[in-house]
Image (tube, coloured by chain):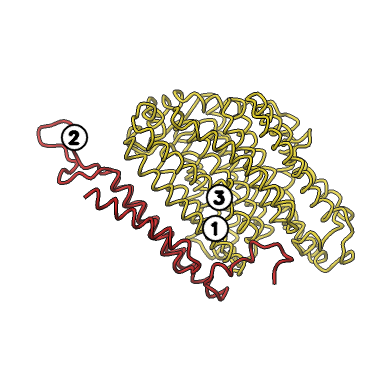
Amino acid sequence: MSKIIMLPILFPVCAALIMIFFRRSVAMHRILNVAATASMLVVSLVILGSVRSEGILSLQVGGWEAPFGITLVADMLSSIMVVSAALIGFTTALYSLGTIDEEREHFFYYPLLQLLLMGINGAFLTGDIFNLYVWFEVMLISSFVLLVLGGRPQQLEGAIKYVTLNLLSSSVFLAAAGILYGTAGTLNMADLAMRIPLLDHRELLSVVAVLFLITFGVKAAIFPLFFWLPASYHTPPVAVSAIFAGLLTKVGVYAIMRFFTTIFTHDGVSFIHQVLLVLSAFTMVVGVLGAVVQYDMRKLLSFHIISQIGYMIFALAVQSPLAIAGALFYIVHNIVAKTNLFYLSGLVHRLKGSWDLREIGGIYRFYPMLGLLFLVPALGLAGIPPLSGFWAKYVVIKAGIDSEHYLLVGVALGVSMLTLFSMMKIWNEGFWKNDPRGEGSVEDEGYLRTPTMKKAVTLVPIIMLGFLTVMFGLWFEPFFEFADRAAYELLDVYNYIDAVIGGRS
Amino acid sequence: MTFLLAVIVGALYAAGTYLVLRRSIVKVIFGLIFLGHAANLMIFTVGRLTKGVPAFVPEGAEILTEPFADPLPQALILTSIVIGFGVQAFALVLFKRAYLTLGTEDLDKMRSTDQLPEERL
């Protein structure tokens, strides 16, 4: 049964390979892309279901026993993340059908998307630190190519910043993994969790912990390591921006979560949680302030990613079971809402031909339903009650109050006001005010001429994710149960160790 | 030997850091390559250097006895060299492309993606 956790990695790699062999047939790429991501979604849901009923699943790749071979582990946290990745992969596959130009499709856009998903799934499922490094690189190299595909000057310029900072963080990761192996003699996460409390070299472990924090800090775009994100995320086509915005930074947050709840748990590194608290405050504030001044929709949303990461880091730093569950729920809510907002910004661009909010307007008047579809993720992100963001913020802030971090709770509440403000800025400028160029501009007609099929496939993902945002809000409890379960699993390290080292598959 | 390697690792890190902070993209890519090598050598060094004792089980014995040269750091380095090679090759091509398209190799002039629209010249 546990062999099933290979599938979220195998599906994308097989799909990508088949696509590369049949490089001329773009139609086949499209179908295979949607089919592969759809089956990934189904498989990941099955994994989630069986982890829920049977507990942690682990697989020793190649049959080498636990600390020696490569281990794949699906606990609650991993399987929730894999489901989110598959969901975003599937919606992006649909959205790409309607928005990606044929030239990019010919230059391996779909195989790259699959390889990106493979890297992300691998990073979520692996139980070995060096293997995590490898998956990070798989993910990075495909994201590099996706970012520059098309080769416009802006893309290349953004890519230079993105590539340089991410390569730097990879070399820090490698160094940290090396030192950790030198001190602990193993890189298997479960084995490390078992051995680290018994080690003598506390100072060296603190250094390793900080190095890992820097690495994952760059990936997750926490303050002050986020500069690559707003410099690059607005340059590629919006389908690419959306999948990056939804998933890539969350892989960094996932890694921080895994490392600082499972592996580095002893007293010597408890200062990390203090550091994370301070960083989270700055991340929230700086991100949202960056967003408030922007008029380019994509840049505004990019800065928002940073601000939202702050909430997750805050919850992680608090470390109570409630906070960890809150962080996880927040991650999933944010993946859904943020990706949706990027999809919508692409649609607005299609309608109005500009990313600049000052140049556009009047969408609500002609497309009231689109306005509604925008309000769901926008208000969801800001945390307005019936939607998912309210519960995410409620749990995080409740955990903050319980642990008496009043100052940070204040910051979090203030930042969500500013979040609401910047979302309303998009609403007022793009949807509510009259179009400064007069109604029925040329771009508008261009949109009307696009085939209905293409319009439909761009709308379906938006409706799907919007529906989920509402569902998370209205049926909060069943969803939160999963997050709660994951939090208890994470904090009970022995369970994890037992499943990996004790379990034979 | 360990001391010598430690000095080399330190020198590579210093040189790499210095180069990444330069304005020319050519120097930045060299800096990244140096940092990659520094990390690889560091894994090699902290994995403990053991001379002349390969990790073979001696005749008649059932298990390995200390000391033996740990093969794992070398396997890690091998993997990371291959990955690093691919990624650095990509970065080189990207930097060249960027130089040809943007017409500059000065990082201080590459600011258009970070500016607000009204600041743009």
**Which residue is more in the foreground, A372 or B6?**
B6
Of the two numbered discs 1 and 3 in the rendering, the one whose residue sits closer to the viewer: 3
- The circle drawn on residue A162 is 1
Q: How far apart are the alpha carbons under marks 3 and 2?
A: 43 Å
Residue A172's x, y, as percent? 43, 49
Callout 2, which amino acid?
Glu
Q: Chain of mark 2?
A: B
Instruction: Check the rendered structure and report the hue given to chain A.
Output: yellow
Q: Write down the residue under mark 3.
A: A225
In the figure, the red chain has which letter? B
Of the two numbered discs 3 and 2 in the rendering, the one whose residue sits closer to the viewer: 3
At label 3, counting other C-alpha atoms closer than 10 Å, the crowd grade (few under 14, some 14-19, many 20 or more) is: some
Q: Earlier in the sequence, mark 1 or mark 3?
A: 1
- Left/right of residue B112 with respect to residue A76 in the rendered view: right
Residue B70's x, y, as percent? 24, 42
Both marks 3 and 2 on one chain: no
Name the image quarter holding residue A190: top left
* Identity of the residue drawn at 52% across and 38% down: A256
Q: Write down the residue under mark 2.
A: B66
Q: Secondary structure at mark 2?
A: loop
**Relative to A175, is A71 above or below?**
above
**Which residue is more in the foreground, B47 or A146?**
B47
Name the image quarter holding residue A410: top right
Residue A209's x, y, as percent? 44, 38
Callout 3, which amino acid?
Leu
Name the image quarter holding residue A321: top right
At label 1, counting other C-alpha atoms closer than 10 Å, the crowd grade (few under 14, some 14-19, many 20 or more) is: many
**Which residue is more in the foreground, A95 or B16?**
B16
